[in-house]
Image (cartoon, grey):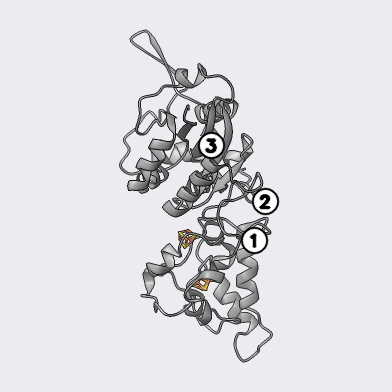
Amino acid sequence: MAKPKVAFYWCASCGGCEEAVVDLAEDLLKVVDAVDIVLWPVALDFKRKDVEAMKDGAIAVSFINGAVRTEEQEEMVKLLRKKSGLVVAFGSCAHIGGIPGLANFWDRETIFERVYKDVPSVRNPEGIYPQQKTKVDGVELTLPEFYDTVYTLDQVINVDYYLPGCAPPPDLIMNAVTAILEGKLPDKGSVLAPDKSLCDTCPRKDSKPEKLSIKAIRRPHEVIADPEKCFLEEGIICLGPATRSGCGERCINANMPCRGCFGPTKGVRDQGAKMVSAIASILGVEDEDKVTEEEVESLVKQIDDPAGLFYMYSLPASMLRRKRMG
Ligand code: SF4
Ligand code: SF4
């Protein structure tokens, strides 16, 4: 019997999601045995024309990681959508925009200016930017258009399932692959991870404060956090209250606060806004003995780059989507 065809593709991403597949270790052999991989640019030499030659729907499932920020990525994900029965947004960047999505605080012009002119290590006296078309020895070379805005995968094509995380952990990947192979998938549109907040599963949850009595907000590099205490108790912002569980509390176990890579739980429309509201509720001033209004204001001012912090992974998927330039 023919094995189901599977494609892996990467858009705007760091390559960590590709490593997560390799991190399946011996389970990768089970996957390779059960499926026929027809596209995996990081590992195998299949070409776009090979995918174009397939019948529509011929690929059982495409796992696409990375956000969409260039014309080529848009074309490829639309091609894979046409050729695939199922599309899984694999990892934070495809799911909610991820770290590449922070570029939505700028636009192409400001990014190019910084990268190709202002960075101290760049020498570009004529201020030349990459061109979409250029001639070298009479031969025209092309580059895909670089968009002003970074998009989540489901802002460009229909997505059937989401595997969250930066990168998705091996157990969730194997659960998803097994569910696909056995045809035991949940409702379309589901995120293939528990619908609980990270605080619900965190080993430090018993010390999570209802009201904060801290005098300062501290960044992780400024202090060695007490490994027994909730980060919020120590004045270190942790996005656990606004983030879905399922990662195995990876950062917490490494004594680092959560930065929100799993995205929000089902009922939360905007992860950053949820975190602002979680912080606001524990910085409440009802208990006069604990925090005064002035102290709250002073604490809020100590949060460096709140937009970048609260929307570290989710800006493109948020209600804000991007900063309005000009
Ligand atoms: S805020 Fe962070 S450290 Fe505190 S309980 Fe939630 S996930 Fe754990
Ligand atoms: S603790 Fe937060 S940032 Fe770290 S892996 Fe888990 S969800 Fe992602």
Mark 1 in CB contact with mark 2 (< 8 angstroms): yes
| Label 3 sits on residue | 68
The x and y percentages for residue 21 are 39, 44
Q: Secondary structure at mark 3?
A: strand
The x and y percentages for residue 108 are 52, 36
Q: Residues under labels 3 and 1: Cα distance?
A: 24 Å
| Label 2 sits on residue | 319
Using the image, determine if residue 244 lies above or below residue 121: below
Q: Earlier in the sequence, mark 1 or mark 2?
A: 1
Q: Quadrant of the C terminus?
A: top right
Q: Earlier in the sequence, mark 3 or mark 1?
A: 3
The x and y percentages for residue 72 are 50, 27
Q: Image quarter for residue 153?
A: top right
The amino acid pointed to by label 3 is Val
Q: Image quarter for residue 295?
A: bottom right
Q: Image quarter for residue 279?
A: bottom right
Observer-nearest of 123 and 9: 9
Observer-nearest of 169 and 2: 2
The amino acid pointed to by label 2 is Met
| Label 1 sits on residue | 273
Q: Secondary structure at mark 1?
A: helix
Using the image, determine if residue 227 lies above or below residue 151: below
The residue depicted at 46 percent of the width and 21 percent of the height is: 48
Q: Is mark 1 within 8 Å of ligand 1?
A: no
